[in-house]
Image: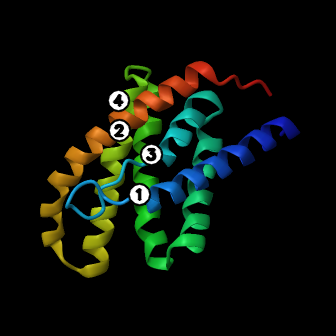
């Protein structure tokens, strides 16, 4: 791997971690706990389209672990990892078909992230009733996915990547 690509991925990782920290400092705009925009997914969507799935997946997984260790806990890593893996798999599958826009891929990722976290919460707490929380999170996921999809599409158009 070229040094320029490694440097680009390191900068992408740093940006994803900074966006994650910034988002953790923003108070919730709604009364529903856990609703966030998912600013770090801007970086992941960008990498998925401009660099590749392997690189985007690596940045996503490493970011989850590092942010969890720096700003969260082992439990937060567990929840984030469940959401990130399910989200990423869904985004990769949709992108591979070539039938969906960047925004549709982003919305799918946001919704699946919420699904993954709720499923992990059900598993950890052994409480299936948490599924009832999912419709609210899915609506917020669609809205967040649209915002992230727009930002990701703008980055894909405007940021050159030549390695």
- Distance from Cα at disc 3 to Cα at disc 4: 14 Å
Q: Residues within 10 Å of mark 4 (few under 14, many from 20)?
A: some
Residue wearing tag 4: 104
Residue wearing tag 1: 26
Residue wearing tag 2: 145
Where residue 116 appears, as percent x and y from the top left, is 34, 58
Which mark is first along the chain, 4 or 2? 4
Can you see residue 134?
A: yes
- Distance from Cα at disc 2 to Cα at disc 3: 15 Å
Secondary structure, mark 3, is: helix
The reply, left or right, for residue 2 in relation to residue 49 is right
Where residue 146 appears, as percent x and y from the top left, is 34, 33
Secondary structure, mark 4, is: helix
Return the mark for residue 89. Answer: 3
Vertical placement of residue 149 versus 28, above or below: above
Where residue 87 appears, as percent x and y from the top left, is 41, 48
Please state which of the two labelled residues, at mark 2 or mark 4, is closer to the viewer.
Answer: 2
The reply, left or right, for residue 50 in relation to residue 152 is right
- Distance from Cα at disc 1 to Cα at disc 2: 18 Å
Which mark is first along the chain, 2 or 1? 1
Which mark is first along the chain, 3 or 1? 1
Return the mark for residue 64. Answer: none
Please state which of the two labelled residues, at mark 4 or mark 1, is closer to the viewer.
Answer: 1
């Amino acid at each position: 791997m070229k040094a320029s690509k490694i440097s680009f991925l390191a900068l992408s990782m740093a940006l994803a971690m900074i966006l994650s920290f910034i988002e953790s400092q923003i108070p919730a705009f709604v009364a529903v706990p856990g609703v966030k925009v998912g600013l770090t997914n801007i970086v992941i969507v960008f990498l998925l389209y401009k660099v590749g799935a392997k690189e985007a997946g690596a940045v996503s997984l490493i970011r989850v672990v590092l942010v969890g260790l720096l700003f969260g806990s082992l439990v937060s890593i567990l929840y984030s990892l469940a959401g990130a893996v399910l989200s990423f798999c869904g985004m990769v599958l949709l992108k591979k078909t070539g039938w969906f826009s960047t925004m549709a891929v982003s919305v799918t990722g946001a919704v699946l992230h919420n699904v993954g976290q709720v499923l992990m919460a059900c598993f950890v707490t052994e409480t299936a009733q948490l599924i009832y929380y999912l419709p609210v999170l899915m609506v917020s996921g669609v809205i967040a996915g649209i915002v992230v999809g727009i930002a990701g599409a703008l980055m894909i158009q405007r940021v050159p990547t030549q390695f």
